[in-house]
Image (tube, rainbow, N blue to C red):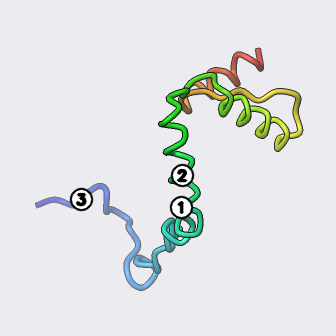
Amino acid sequence: MGRDPLRAGAATGPAADPDPIPLVDLQASYRPIQSALLREFEAILGEMNLLLGPRTQALEREFARHCECEHGVAVSSGTDALRAALEAYG
């Protein structure tokens, strides 16, 4: 077999296998808020007011306040967020 072009010039020795960067412990972040989060999910799903309701409006207001701007807009995806930002930019 020939030389692997992806491995050509690859480092060898101790520098080739550095210690992996530890991932964020999402369980540690989730545990303290689990019961409150589940209560909120149950309330949201019980209301079935998933779009443009009072919770969405509250999120938009809180986000705008956090960003110190006049308006916040909730969108359904990262793609929609990028599109909205580009359209707002002109």
Q: Position of residue 21 (x, y in %)?
A: 51, 73
Residue identifier under label 2? 39
Which residue sits at x=58%, y=57%? 36
Given contact means CB atoms under 8 Å apart, are the residues at marks 2 and 3 in contact? no
* Image position of 75 (left or right of 63): left
Image quarter of residue 86: top right
Residue 4, labelled with which disc? Answer: 3
CA distance for labels 1 and 2: 6 Å
Given contact means CB atoms under 8 Å apart, are the residues at marks 1 and 2 in contact? yes
Helix, strand or loop status at disc 2: helix
The quarter of the picture where the N terminus appears is bottom left
Q: Is residue 66 above or below residue 85?
A: below
Q: Position of residue 61 (x, y in %)?
A: 79, 33
Q: Is residue 58 above or below residue 18?
A: above
* Image position of 65 (left or right of 78): right
Q: Amino acid at mark 1?
A: Ser
Which residue sits at x=48%, y=68%? 27
Image quarter of residue 87: top right
Badge 1 or badge 3: first in the primary sequence: 3
Residue identifier under label 1? 35
> Which mark is nearer the camera, 2 or 3?
2
Which residue sits at x=31%, y=56%? 6
Q: Position of residue 83 (x, y in %)?
A: 62, 21
Q: Amino acid at mark 2?
A: Arg
CA distance for labels 1 and 3: 52 Å
Q: Position of residue 18 (x, y in %)?
A: 46, 79
* Viewer-nearest residue: 43 or 82: 43
Given contact means CB atoms under 8 Å apart, are the residues at marks 1 and 3 in contact? no
Helix, strand or loop status at disc 1: helix
Badge 2 or badge 3: first in the primary sequence: 3
Q: Amino acid at mark 3?
A: Asp
